[in-house]
Image (cartoon, rainbow, N blue to C red):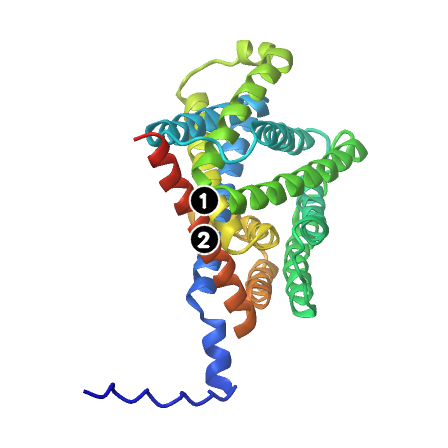
């Protein structure tokens, strides 16, 4: 019996408007944008928890983060032990990442004591060019003109929010604005280093190992730092429901934030993560409107729309870029599966 004839070759699809729209609404683009807004909402929740603690006179930034690191170590470390997985990356890389991450959190929270909220919001954008430079040098990430346009629109949207705050009420300069501004700039650089390192590690290893080791070393480093810098502050806190609940809310939001970030980094990269976090200030505005019934300037809504457009422009991928991303993601997943199978064979 003769074999069936081969199917006719498919005709090339013209690059019309429909194809262009299809690239804009690819599943991976929408999924990355949605996850980016999830982490943005989570970081907004941590900001409200920190504000509540500050309002009660509690100033213990390292102590706030300690419970998050403990949760990461217990949950993801437990999964590693259950799977009997050996580390795929040397432990001292995670130690370095833990030091960078703990100090970035500490320095940025500390800066609020010296400078205004407006200055922190504006200078925190410094992490974006730092991430672009670091990913270009170390991860060989390519950036075209379209991506720089997207970054520019996102940053312009946040600057509109800052100018609106200046116009409205936030004119306070803080007791030592120069010191506070320098702390924010340095903290933003550490955040950039942390994000880029996490992107590299999660693509070389897997999310479970990254979170378990970051939690372990983050908890150890935080514990040492608390014993040196925050013992008196912890002794002076009156541990009632008003103090405990913001601590728990901050830890839970940070745990979910850290658990989601590696997925965003793997799909979209560190630059897209930092751009997505720009919308956290705008989500805070919406919470102020609906939860506290505050009136806000119309510029906020223009800024939110502008940042959303910038994220879409940055995340847009041509057919070639989408194919390359899929190949990289597929190769990374295969490496992860192979590592799990090898660990299972070594530890039956």
Within 10 Å of the Cα at label 1, are there few (<14), some (14-19), or many (20+) other Cα atoms?
A: some
Q: Residue at the spot x=71%, y=40% of the render?
A: 189
- 2 and 1 marks in contact (CB < 8 Å): yes
Q: Which mark is residue 260?
A: 1
Which residue carries the number 2 mark?
A: 35
Q: Which quadrant is home to the N terminus?
A: bottom left
In this view, which residue lies farthest toward the front?
A: 1
Q: Earlier in the sequence, mark 2 or mark 1?
A: 2
* Image coords of residue 311 (percent x, y): 57, 62
Residue 335's place in the image compared with 238, above or below, is below
Quarter of the image where one finds residue 159: bottom right
Per the image, label 1 sits on a secondary structure element best described as helix
Residue 170's place in the image compared with 155, above or below, is above
Within 10 Å of the Cα at label 2, are there few (<14), some (14-19), or many (20+) other Cα atoms?
A: many
Residue 67's place in the image compared with 36, above or below, is above
Residue 171's place in the image compared with 34, above or below, is above
* Image coords of residue 203 (percent x, y): 53, 47
């Amino acid at each position: 019996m003769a074999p069936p004839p081969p199917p006719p070759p498919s005709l090339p699809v013209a690059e019309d408007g429909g194809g262009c729209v299809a690239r804009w609404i690819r599943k991976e683009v929408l999924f990355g944008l949605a996850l980016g807004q999830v982490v943005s909402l989570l970081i907004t929740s941590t900001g409200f928890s920190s504000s509540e603690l500050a309002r009660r006179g509690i100033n213990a930034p390292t102590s706030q983060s300690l419970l998050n690191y403990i949760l990461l170590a217990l949950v993801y470390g437990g999964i590693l032990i259950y799977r009997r997985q050996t580390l795929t990356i040397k432990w001292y890389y995670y130690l370095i990442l833990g030091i960078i991450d703990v100090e970035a959190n500490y320095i940025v929270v500390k800066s609020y004591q010296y400078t205004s909220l407006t200055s922190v919001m504006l200078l925190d954008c410094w992490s974006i060019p730092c991430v672009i430079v670091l990913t270009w040098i170390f991860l060989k990430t390519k950036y075209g003109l379209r991506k720089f346009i997207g970054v520019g629109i996102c940053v312009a949207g946040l600057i509109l929010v800052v100018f609106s705050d200046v116009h409205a009420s936030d004119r306070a300069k803080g007791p030592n604005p120069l010191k506070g501004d320098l702390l924010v700039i340095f903290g933003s650089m550490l955040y950039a280093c942390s994000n880029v390192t996490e992107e590299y590690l999660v693509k070389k290893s897997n999310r479970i190992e990254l979170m378990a080791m970051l939690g372990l070393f983050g908890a150890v480093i935080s514990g040492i730092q608390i014993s040196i810098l925050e013992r008196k502050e912890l002794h002076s806190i009156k541990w009632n429901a008003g103090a405990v609940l913001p601590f728990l809310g901050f830890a839970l939001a940070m745990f979910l934030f850290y658990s989601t970030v590696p997925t965003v980094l793997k799909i979209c990269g560190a630059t897209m993560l930092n751009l997505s976090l720009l919308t956290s200030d705008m989500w805070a505005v919406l919470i102020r409107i609906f939860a506290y019934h505050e009136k806000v300037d119309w510029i906020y809504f223009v800024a939110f729309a502008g940042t959303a457009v910038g994220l879409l422009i940055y995340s847009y991928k041509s057919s070639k870029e989408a194919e390359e991303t899929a190949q990289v993601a597929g190769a990374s997943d295969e490496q992860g599966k192979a590592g799990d199978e090898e660990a299972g064979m070594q530890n039956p």
